[in-house]
Amino acid sequence: MGPKSIDYMGNLVGRSQVAVDVHLHAFAVDAGIPSLRYEQLRAVYEEAAVLLGHEQGGLEHAVWRYQPGAV
């Protein structure tokens, strides 16, 4: 099991966290964020959630739904 699966499982049990998938990665690239390792990109999303006053999982979900083809 990799870090994305572990983060996703955390969300399923009520922990609000970011599980970076292809949709979140594509959104970051579109926003001008260079290709980062999983842990680095997750940290970018986590910090963005704090700065925006959102739960981490809520920000992840919003980006996921925004990306074309995600739903």
Image (cartoon, rainbow, N blue to C red):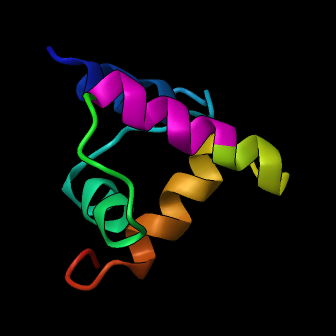
Q: Is 28 located above or below residue 62 in the figure? A: above
48, 70: nearer the viewer: 48
Query: Is residue 42 one of those drawn in magenta?
Result: yes
Report the residue that reaches farthest toward the right: 53
> In x, y percent, where is residue 13?
52, 26
Q: Which residues are magenta?
A: 38-47
Left or right: 3, with 54 as reference point: left
Residue positioned most to the left: 1
Q: How far across and how far down the image is residue 46, in percent? A: 61, 37
Give residue 31's quadrant in the image.
bottom left
Going by the image, does 45 lie left or right of 49? left
* Residue 23: image location, x then y, percent: 27, 62
Residue sitting at x 43%, y 80% = 66
Name the residue: 66% across, 48% down. Answer: 48
Horizontal side of 64 relative to 18 (left or right) equals left
Q: Main secondary structure of the magenta part?
A: helix
Which residue is drawn at the image coordinates 28% and 36% (left, top)? 36
Query: What residue is rendered at 38% in x and 64% in y?
Result: 32
Q: Measured from the top left, where is residue 5 in percent x and y?
A: 25, 27
Looking at the picture, does residue 11 appear above or below residue 56? Answer: above
Q: Quadrant of the C terminus?
A: bottom left
Among all residues in the image, which is located at the extreme bottom?
68
- Relative height, residue 34 to residue 61 (above, below): above
Name the quadrant of the N terminus: top left
Q: Please, is residue 67 above or below residue 54 in the view?
A: below
- Looking at the picture, tell me which residue is in the foreground, 52 or 18: 52
> Is 70 left, or right, of 24 in this rendering?
left
User: Which residue occupies the foreground of this view, 35 or 64?
Assistant: 35
